[in-house]
Amino acid sequence: MTDSIDALRARVNAFVEERDWAQFHSPKNLAMAMIVEAAEVVEHFQWMTEADSRQLDEETRQKVGQELADTFVYLLRIAEVCGINLIQAANAKIDLNAQKYPVEKCKGSNAKYTEYQSID
């Protein structure tokens, strides 16, 4: 079992290399595959109520976990192929979002930043 992003990325890369699949892993193809898997995550929640979606039975939790894993693996591959450090990119995005969504203006609100950006 791998318990870090770097170890998981190395394991995924080895898996791909052993099967000679890198030839099929263009950013376009990987992005499309990731979206298909993300849609499969959504499919499990499609007709649930908000409350039901927060209390998954074990079978559904397992299925959702498998689809999330597929999505995550494709995300790792896209980052690998494009030369993007996901940890750095995520931290940079959180910093940007902190500027766009300052606590004093958005705490407890689900409004998009454009709705309060000009309010001062």
Image (tube, helix red, strand yellow):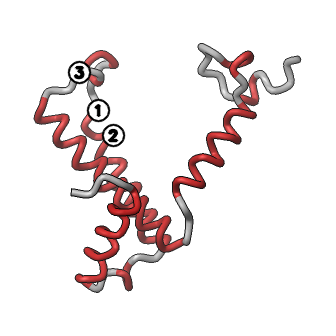
Q: Sequence order check: which comes first, mark 3 or mark 2?
A: 2
Real-space CA distance between mark 2 and mark 1, rounded to the nearest whole angstrom: 5 Å
Residue type indicated by callout 3: Gln
Q: Is residue 86 left or right of residue 75?
A: right
Residue type indicated by callout 1: Phe
Nearest the viewer among 102 and 33 is 102
Label 2, secondary structure: give it. Answer: helix
Real-space CA distance between mark 3 and mark 2, rounded to the nearest whole angstrom: 15 Å
Q: Mark 1 Cα within 10 Å, few/some/many (few <14, many 20+)?
A: some
Q: Nearer the viewer, mark 3 or mark 2?
A: 3
Q: Position of residue 76 (x, y in %)?
A: 42, 62
Q: Mark 2 Cα within 10 Å, few/some/many (few <14, many 20+)?
A: some
Q: Position of residue 111 (x, y in %)?
A: 65, 22
Q: Residue under circle 3?
A: 55
Q: Position of residue 63 (x, y in %)?
A: 18, 43
Q: Which mark is residue 42?
A: 2
Label 1, secondary structure: give it. Answer: helix
Q: Which mark is residue 56?
A: none
Q: Is residue 94 left or right of residue 38?
A: right
Q: Residue under circle 1?
A: 45
Residue at x 27% of width, y 24% of height: 48
